[in-house]
Image (cartoon, grey):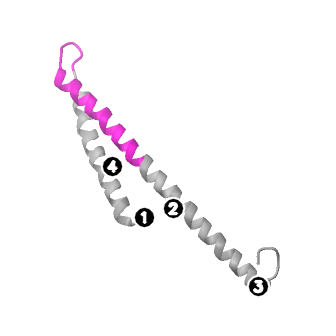
């Protein structure tokens, strides 16, 4: 994964956060004594923004965990190779 992939996800998360702040502020101005469908729609927008952030975060987490595992596997392979070299290439793994 390149940094660009993370940049796109982080940008999407930021956009969701920006919208969420606006929609929550509007929701906080509601007057429950009267119908305000536009404010209710903004509450739905806030929920959608949260769902979008969760989806992006889950995607970033999944990619990161996959990259961490691959990096750990590469590290383990390097350590195994160094140990084999130190033992002179003898032993069960050579």
Q: Residues within 10 Å of mark 3 (few under 14, many from 20)?
A: few
At 47% from the left and 52% from the top, the residue drawn is 61
At 76% from the left and 78% from the top, the residue drawn is 94
Check residue 53 for magenta coloring.
Answer: yes
Label number found at residue 13: 4
For this view, does 46 lie left or right of residue 87? left
Q: Which residue is mark 3?
A: 86
Cα separation, mark 3 vs mark 1, equals 33 Å
* First in residue order: circle 3 vs circle 1: 1
* First in residue order: circle 2 vs circle 3: 2
Task: Indicate the position of residue 6 as horizontal and vertical percent values.
Answer: 37, 59
* First in residue order: circle 1 vs circle 4: 1
Cα separation, mark 2 vs mark 1, equals 8 Å
Question: Which span is picked out in magenta?
Answer: 31-57
Dot 1: element = loop
Cα separation, mark 2 vs mark 4, equals 20 Å
Label number found at residue 87: none
Task: Indicate the position of residue 85 as horizontal and vertical percent values.
Answer: 73, 85
In-front residue for pair 56/36: 56
Please tell me how many numbered marks the rendered image carries: 4
């Amino acid at each position: 994964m390149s940094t660009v992939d993370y940049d796109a996800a982080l940008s999407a998360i930021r956009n969701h956060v920006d919208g969420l702040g606006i929609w929550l502020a509007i929701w906080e101005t509601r007057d429950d004594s009267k119908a305000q469908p536009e404010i209710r729609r903004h509450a739905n927008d806030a929920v959608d923004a949260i769902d979008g952030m969760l989806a992006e975060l889950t995607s970033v987490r999944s990619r990161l965990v996959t990259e961490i595992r691959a990096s750990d596997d590469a590290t383990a392979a390097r350590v195994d190779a160094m140990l084999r070299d130190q033992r002179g290439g003898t032993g069960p793994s050579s």
